[in-house]
Amino acid sequence: MTTTLHPRPLRLCVNIDHVATIRNARGGDHPDPVRAAEIVAAAGGDGITAHLREDRRHIRDADLARIQEATDLPLNLEMAATREMLEIALRHRPHAACIVPERREERTTEGGLDAAGQHNSLAPIIDELKGAGIRVSLFIEADERQLDAALRLGAPVVEFHTGEYAHAFLDGDRDKIAREVKRITDMAALAAKNGIEPHAGHGLTYANVQPIAAIPQIAELNIGHFLIGEAVFVGLDHAIRRMRELMDEAR
Ligand code: PXP
């Protein structure tokens, strides 16, 4: 499927994994992540993000094709750098593939990808994805060593892991918040200077999105857990529109 990105200064891609988490809790087909994808499109979201985990705890293989059929929005497939996931990506040809570290026992993606330490195993996977016309992103910490590795690996995009920033926010640790914002700001500028498009995501909420949305080089935010949780109270459409307003306000 060919897709075009909206000419917006900051894109909001909605991670719909946790709609599938709720569905899987009962083993049936409700709530359907496809319906969530349709609502994302109607609410002005710029893309759908889904993480096909090795244990299929939320999104499943069959969901991917259904999501791609249901909406023209670009699909950003989050995947571990494994042969199995590469083959799935090559079959589905999402707009983008974001390579994430994955450990079975983790609750969510904790920490960024060690692009520097795993150069040799990542290189062929990145090359195959790029060869298939898939835009590759690496989910890394905002740190110069990892950014340099992304550059050497030829990744056109990096997504900075905002988990530490989100934790600092929860702890109300102002110094750490300031340090994290500076770190992400500096690395976003360095990425852009080197021709890499910086994205950001993880743990973003209404309360903490604006300092990250204000970083001028950041082109896309990937937000999931908060939006799906908030949707329980106000509906997914409303939650997305509110997040969009806050992002635009910060720009
Ligand atoms: N970006 C990446 C690469 C992720 O792995 C995740 C979590 O799956 C997110 C963004 C979204 O994080 P959250 O669900 O905390 O908004």
Image (cartoon, grey):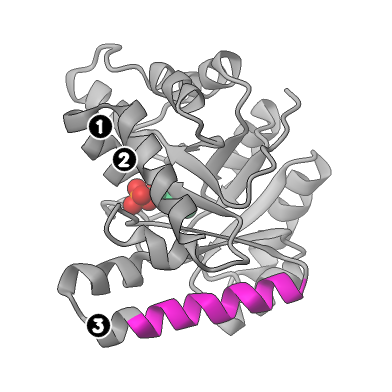
With 196 as the anchor, is 64 left or right in this view? left
With 237 as the anchor, is 114 left or right in this view? right
The kind of residue on which mark 1 rests is Ala
Q: Is residue 163 magenta?
A: no
The kind of residue on which mark 2 rests is Leu
The kind of residue on which mark 3 rests is Arg
Q: Nearer the viewer, residue 185 or 74?
A: 185
Q: Position of residue 125 (x, y in %)?
A: 69, 52
Mark 2 = which residue? 227
Q: Which residues are magenta?
A: 178-194
- As drawn, the residue found furthest toward the right would be 131
Q: Residue at x 66, y 37 (%)?
A: 6
Mark 3 = which residue? 174
Report the Cα–Cα distance between label 1 and label 2.
6 Å
Report the Cα–Cα distance between label 2 and label 3.
24 Å
Report the Cα–Cα distance between label 3 and label 1.
29 Å
